[in-house]
Image (spheres, rainbow, N blue to C red):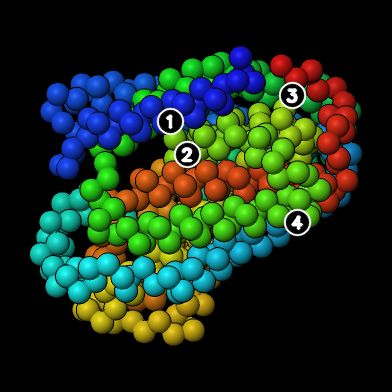
Amino acid sequence: MRGKQHYLIFVAMAAGAGIGLWIGGENGVKPDANMFVWFSELFGKTIFIGALKAIVAPLIFFSIIASIVCLPTTGELWQIGWRTLVFYLVTTSIAVGIGLLLVLTIQPGMRGDRDGLRARWPEMKKELSTEYAEKESKLKGGKSAGEIIRQNITRIIQNPFEALSTRNSLGIIFFAILIGIALIAIGEAGRPVIPVVQGINAAIMRLTGWIMAGAPFFIFCLVAALTARYGTSLFATVGWYVATIIAAIGCHVVVLLVIVRVFGKRSPFAFLKGIRRAWAVAFATRSSAATLPVTMECVRDELKVPRKIGDFVLPLGATVNMDGTALYEGVAIIFLIQLFGGLPGAEIDLTATTTIVIFLTAVLASIGAAAVPDAGLITMVLVAGAVGLSEEFIPIIFAVDAFLDMFRTSTNVMGDSVGAVVISRLTGSVPGDEDCAGAPAAA
Ligand code: ASP
């Protein structure tokens, strides 16, 4: 059944989009369909995403410990750790670079009805202000780079129980790494704990399998509700912007596949086949954290990446590696400058220095973004602030954000999976490697 499930998932996505378009109108959901959308959100968001999120904190915690105690020495942890971080930083930078190249070439902000939009802006600003007010509290999240760094340090050094209960993945990862190292350090005394941790880890993966059994239905609900709510009318205003982001993401996916071939020594087709379920879940849930259990399952079972690598590299990737988000933030800010440059609050020239500042802050903002829907939109304020663009222009792209979030989240998950394949090859953990001795047989 599982072998065929991805077909069902893709059919469900297409059917959901079709029904969503049918029941959604120019001004939102048709009144008769409100009940349908309510139920779709109940099953898709509340139950499916809720269930995946519920297991993600313990999954990150136990899988990281289980992966570390599998390593023969802490030296190997260091080898995997630094390679992973460098890999993630390089691929995120490539993503932003591609985004900037395309947005500067295509110039989406200069196309379409630019003059009309600029003229209507004062009036549109008022219309968008209700929506803006709703998101404003979130948007106030992190304004300066210093503030983001301070916030992240506070998240890393946190009481582990608080980190688990608030799903603070940086705090969970940090504590799990320390506990894993300590278990290796205490030798004999820590040995009885190891099979327990590995057993819990295997049980959580089994829970993931149970949740995923209903994935086609849940994904149908998610896509139908989203399409019904947002429809297609919004593309008229910012169509070029949407097209630029999707084209840039397409280019980055090609780069990732080349990396899989060259550094991971894997067939790109086999790779895509292996991660298709995780890709679809990321697309529909718009959360790389909620997708993490499925990503781990695909990377381990389909791509045969040893557990000791996947269980460490993937949770870390879901937290700090967001290629799609970084690319999107860079493109979005340049688009806004192209569109509104010169108006009050956007007196900015697109010089080389401005572009470099956008490049650097987009990378930083993506690292700080949480792996949840809309997070990229929130941390984008950091990039805007760094070049002096007023955040009052951001609401113009709210309407298409949920749609673009599908593409950037699935790219984020793909980037993490490429990381797992490449790191396993670079550290000599070839496919088919024996998994950790003493680990319970995979469920
Ligand atoms: N939704 C994205 C993720 O979970 C983050 C973002 O909004 O860009 O990976």
Q: Which residue sits at x=74%, y=34%?
A: 303
Check disc 3: other Cα within 10 Å, few if <14, some if 14-19, many if 20+: many
Question: If you read the primary sequence from the N terminus, does the residue marked by circle 1 or circle 3 appear first?
Answer: 1
Dot 1 beta carbon under 8 Å from ligand 1: no
Q: Which amino acid does label 3 sit on?
A: Gln
Question: If you read the primary sequence from the N terminus, does the residue marked by circle 2 or circle 3 appear first?
Answer: 3
Label 4 sits on residue: 82
Label 2 sits on residue: 283
Q: Which amino acid does label 4 sit on?
A: Trp
Does dot 3 land on a helix, a strand or a loop?
Answer: helix
Give the CA distance from mark 4 to mark 3. 24 Å
Give the CA distance from mark 4 to mark 2. 29 Å
The picture places residue 129, in percent across and down from the top left corner, at 16, 56
> Looking at the image, is mark 1 or mark 3 nearer the viewer?
1
Q: What residue type is labelled 2?
A: Phe
Label 3 sits on residue: 198
> Looking at the image, is mark 2 or mark 3 nearer the viewer?
2
Q: Which amino acid does label 1 sit on?
A: Met
The picture places residue 286, in percent across and down from the top left corner, at 44, 40
In the shown orientation, is residue 91 left or right of residue 67? left
Which quarter of the rendering shows the C terminus?
top right
Which quarter of the rendering shows the N terminus?
top right
The picture places residue 393, in percent across and down from the top left corner, at 26, 66
Label 1 sits on residue: 13
In the shown orientation, is residue 212 left or right of residue 192? left
